[in-house]
Image (tube, helix red, strand yellow):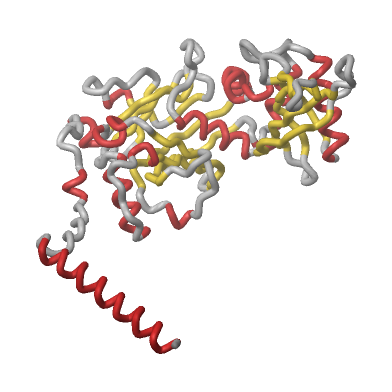
Amino acid sequence: MIKKVLFITAMAFIATFSVNAQNEMDMGGAPPKVKKKTKKEITSPDKHKYTEVQKKYQNQIVFSKSEIKRDQEDASAFVKTWELGEPLYFRVYHSQTLIESEYDYHEKQSREFNEYGYAYFSEQTVVFINGKEMADFEVASGDKEYVTNWVTSSGTVYDSSQEEKTSGSISNVLARAFHALGNDFKEGSYDIEIKVYAMPSVLGGNVERSKDERHALMYSGKIKINVTKEGMNKFAPYLCRNILKKSGQMIDPAIEIQIAESFGRSYGYKALSANIIDSDWSIKRNEFGVVLFRFITSEVAYIDKDGKTEIMEITVKQDHDGSKFQNSVSPYTLTYDRPYCAFCTDYKKTIK
């Protein structure tokens, strides 16, 4: 019986194979494999032309005390030193578009490349201070024009006279690098190197990457930063923005003190400062609409067990007893923590 079943199954397979083979022959054979495109084939015909200045500074970051406009660059105005707190602008030049660099990344990683996945491409910016890597940050781009056609872009490292004091990721990562110095961020001179790599983006944003992935370098640059006490105070409103009050954030010093104290009791750290970043409390109810508690998010600066200053985003709650909310707060969720320079917690004490 078993042999008979096996025989019937085998015959059915052969018959099916013969029918499929005949169908393929009738249709001209199996469809051909899709030919892998070369980098030249994925390069946009609308890719921007290089300016004469770009040809000279290709694959570099250049800096200036004023905005660097494309096609109007004045190379004689480029600077290699920045007095912290003074205006500083940048422009980046790269010989390849982001999609071309992504192609290189996938080739190196032996990964399948999807030219239509431009929303999943990103740039990882890495900052080194005095030769030591201090911070990195990754930004994904969903802008097809930027990904496929741009070979240059610009932004503001810092300008206190502008409404938007910074733009682009360089200033953000530079601030993270200063925070990573912790208590060592003080007056002095710092040699800064910035490198930007093409990467495939990861759901959720910035992630820890293996340094082995950094093989699609798009551009890099160097600048010396002179830091004075005056410059630190000028730069502080941006550098210390996590623990300073911004427009729209709730003002309640008493609750912020409670948050810091509750954080310290719960996790055994010395909390230095808390700053509520929401505009108001949010209410949590059960499936019957009954109020359970209310919650609010804050950023807390604290000293960890190694004596280093860190900052953590924490959401706290006040339970509801059926008639009113309790006065005390308790931790609800933790989001992230990262290094934070002690200068900022000291600076906060000097302002209202």
Instruction: Tell me which corner region of the image, top left, top right, bottom left or bottom right, holds residue 222.
Output: top left
- In the image, residue 68 above or below residue 262: above
Write the residue at 20% across / 73% down: 18
- 324 and 179: which one is in front? 324
Can residue 295 be seen at all in this image of the molecule? Answer: no
Quarter residue 301 falls in: top right
Q: Is residue 126 visible?
A: yes
Where is residue 276? Give x, y as percent: 71, 20
Question: Which residue shows up at 68% across the image and 23% down it?
Answer: 243
Q: With 26 as the anchor, is 180 left or right in this view?
A: right
Asked whether 114 or 162 is in front, the reply is 114
The number of numbered discs placed on residues in the rendered structure image is 0
Q: Is residue 352 left or right of residue 218?
A: right
Q: Residue furthest front?
A: 1
Residue at 83 percent across and 15 percent down: it is: 254
* Vertical comparison of 153 with 200: above or below: above
User: Is residue 152 shown left or right of residue 66?
Assistant: left
- The front one of 122 and 163 is 122
Q: Quadrant of the C terminus?
A: top right
Residue at image location 37% in from the left, 58% down from the top: 109
Q: Is residue 275 left or right of residue 120?
A: right
Residue 21 image offset from top left, x and y in percent? 18, 70
* Position in image of residue 294 (x %, y %): 77, 21
Q: Is residue 258 above or below residue 216?
A: above
Position of residue 260 measured from the top left corner of the image (x, y, whole percent): 81, 27
Image quadrant for the N terminus?
bottom left
